[in-house]
Image: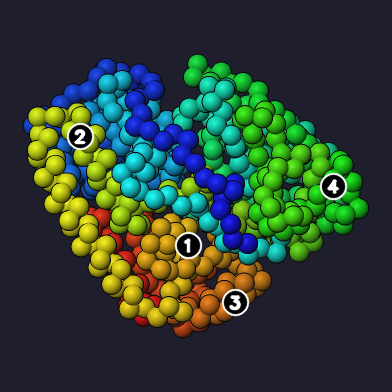
Amino acid sequence: MRRPRPGGRFRLRWRRVVAAVGVAAVAGGCGAVAADDGAVRVVATTEILADLVRAVGGGRVHVDSIVPPGGDPHSYEPTPSDAKKIARADVTFTNHLLLEEHALIKAIDANAPDDAPNVSLAESAETYGAQVIPLVENIALDVPWLGLAVRGSGAGRGATRASEVRLSATALEGPGRLAVYLTHALGEPQVYVDSADGLSTVDSAVLPPDAHTHVNWAFSAPGVYRVTLSAALSTPDGAWTPVGAGTFTFAVGVDPHTVHSGQSGVVVDRGHTDVAVDLDRGELYAWTDAGTGAQRAVAAADVVIDVPNRALDTVPADPRFGFLGPAGSSVHQLPQAVLGKHVHGEIDPHLWQNVANAKAYAQLIRDTLVASDPADRAGYARRTAEYLAELDRLDAHVRTRVATIPAHRRQLVTTHDGFGYLAKAYGLTVAGFVVPNPAQEPSAAQVRKLTETVTNLRVPAVFLEPNLSGRAGVLTQIAKDQGIRICKLYGDAFDERARSYVDMMRHNAGELAACLG
């Protein structure tokens, strides 16, 4: 299935240059302080953004990247020392569009000085010519892919980008236990719901507004289950405001068409569906294209989610997964389908993979720094003009190198959905595949599916990101089995061989041409 996530159109809810929404929460951090050499203190969330700021700011800025070299912005958790850096900043830059771990966004908003510009580049760059695209997921599963989502702006309830939505399991009817969890990229499970000892407030998942995430749903015995979920929204004063509740029916190892649910009885037996919290409507529903092919909201009472017998899985011999049952026992499980923790919204946040969007970032950075340091307006303008010219040459270089690849070989098989802008801008196609649970050996069926994807597309190479290559054993195995190349693309982070945005994109262009040409 291939479609935008989640909705027929996309929007930028936080589309503006924002002021910090909270006072500094670090002792002694009560306002911006100039760097020791008089430079403007800038905090950026990622190395890539920090590099763009240095190109524009030159010696007038002192830039700290919160996510360390080689780190993953999707999962990096800020530390107390990060909060201190933020509290001393004159300017903060995030990418956002849910690229960064939500805890990092909360740290920025809580600790940035009130008078420091706090800019979400991806959400403000459209006015500088950036083009955004929907996040496209292309996962061919033969069982339903059931995620969690937050829909609606929540503006009427006081939601901000630092708000949180708590989705809790409050009641369960059925013949066995339920576990809802995700497996992190290094194999560590994070359990959201475990009914083995009853349900309480700990049986919850927390998401930011407008977000979507992937989880596993595991049932210990076949039969019909009814799961009641309730949602609450955090308010600026730290309280939780109830949003709504709904009861969802699961047909586990039984014919879903014999299970009556509500008036319409919509059966979800394939594709990608979300259990969605709607902050504007104050209700929970299934956001699905089941039955019609068109994305729509189906009331919780009217949906039956199929967990077929082909979803049977074996509990791994790993004590971390003991909550699923004894090692070697069977569970019916709908898989999370992607590698590691993966929280995102409906817009692809990786704008910089299109060089034209990096130009928009640079111009927005220029104007933000000029507003904070007008004495060097001419210097910022000159450095930005020079950098934009360099980016024009880079864009032409990437386009020229990709053009050398025969059209039928421009297929990207990767471990991360971070290359949609690269594909759209330069004429490539992103091919999706199912990533098995990294905590256990892949099953024969999982290996077969991946092998068929690679074989059917006749791809000459697969691509791993340096900071994720240790998590891609299955893809590496299949590439070796098929005798195809394993190549490297930079997505969210640098390494010791690429220490700038220009170096990163030049490498990507060369690697694509060499490995696919």
Secondary structure type for disc 4: loop
Work out whether mark 4 precedes mark 3 in sequence or the reverse, and give the earlier one. Answer: 4
Q: Is residue 186 left or right of residue 253?
A: left
Residue under label 3: 452
Label 4 sits on residue: 265
Sequence order check, earlier mark of 4 and 2: 4
Q: CA distance from mark 4 to mark 3?
A: 34 Å
- Label 4 and label 2: CA atoms lie apart by 56 Å
**Residue picked out by circle 1:** 415
Q: Residue at x 54, y 40 (%)?
A: 211
Q: Nearer the viewer, residue 286 or 103?
A: 286
Give the label on residue 369, or none. Answer: 2
| Other-residue count near label 3 (Cα within 10 Å), few / some / many at <14 / 14–19 / ≥20 | some
* Residue 27 pos. (x, y %): 30, 18
> Does residue 12 show up?
yes
Neighbour tally class for label 2: few under 14, some 14-19, many 20 plus, Cα within 10 Å: many
For residue 409, what is the image quadrant? bottom left
Front disc: 4 or 3: 4
Q: CA distance from mark 1 to mark 4?
A: 36 Å
The amino acid pointed to by label 2 is Leu
Q: Is residue 447 above or below residue 191?
A: below
Relative image position of residue 234 (x, y in whole percent): 55, 24
Q: Is residue 103 visible?
A: no
Q: Amino acid at mark 1?
A: Thr
Q: Residues within 10 Å of mark 1 (few under 14, many from 20)?
A: many
Q: Quadrant of the C terminus?
A: bottom left
Farthest residue to the bottom: give it. Answer: 483
Between disc 1 and disc 2, the foreground one is 2
